[in-house]
Image: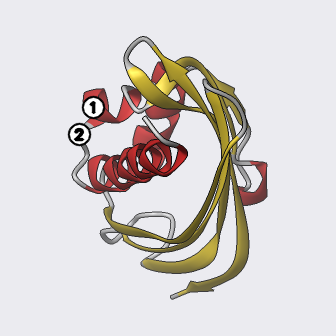
Amino acid sequence: MTGSEEIEVIKQLKARYFRLMDTKSWEGLAAVFTDDVLVDMTGEGGAVTQGAHEFVRVLREHIEEATTVHHGHTAEVEITSATTANGVWAMEDRLWWSPGGPFRHLHGFGHYHETYEKTADGWRIKAMTLTRLHRIFD
């Protein structure tokens, strides 16, 4: 596979991440990550989480009851070896909670900073950090 083809596969992986999160397909979402993924959500007031199933468990606690829409844009993906890559994605998300939730609505903008690893099952997200540029709460 050429570098361009590998980048396209990684873009498809990230597209699955957004779709599976928004459709609450938790088992499928866990499969986009390496088993030992490191996820840093400290910029969101969260924590650093180790492990795909642990991250999905934490994510479910925060958004399972919310309606969510996540979009990734302007991917910058660089293949760094035959089995590793780095990426930065501009993102926009909208989240709506029912009455009694932490907020009524969040509209956010920022970036995902990621590393990827090519495993026996294909490309997976190995590390992910979300940084925010702006948030609108109402």
- Most foreground residue, 85 or 70: 85
Spot occupied by residue 35 in the image (x, y as percentages of width and height):
52, 15
Residue 99, picture quadrant: bottom left
Residue 38, picture quadrant: top right
- Would residue 102 appear left or right of 132 to someone viewing this image? left
Point 34% across, 49% down: residue: 21
- Would residue 47 appear left or right of 4 to someone viewing this image? right
44 relative to 20, above or below: below
- Would residue 2 appear left or right of 43 to someone viewing this image? left
Q: Which residue is mark 1?
A: 28
Spot occupied by residue 87 in the image (x, y as percentages of width and height):
65, 52
Q: Amino acid at mark 1?
A: Gly
> Under tag 2, what secondary structure?
loop
Q: Amino acid at mark 2?
A: Ser
Q: Which residue is mark 2?
A: 25
> Under tag 1, what secondary structure?
helix
Distance CA(mark 2)–CA(mark 1)? 6 Å
95 relative to 8, above or below: below
Q: What kind of colouring is applied to the model shown? A: secondary structure
15 relative to 2, above or below: below
- Most foreground residue, 48 or 10: 10
Total tally of numbered discs in the picture: 2
Spot occupied by residue 54 in the image (x, y as percentages of width and height):
53, 22
Identify the image quadrant of the N terminus: top left
88 relative to 72, above or below: above
Number of residues whose C-alpha sits closer than 10 Å to that of mark 2, classed few (under 14), some (14–19) or many (20 or more): few
- CB within 8 Å, label 2 to label 1: yes
Number of residues whose C-alpha sits closer than 10 Å to that of mark 1, classed few (under 14), some (14–19) or many (20 or more): some
Point 42% across, 46% down: residue: 5
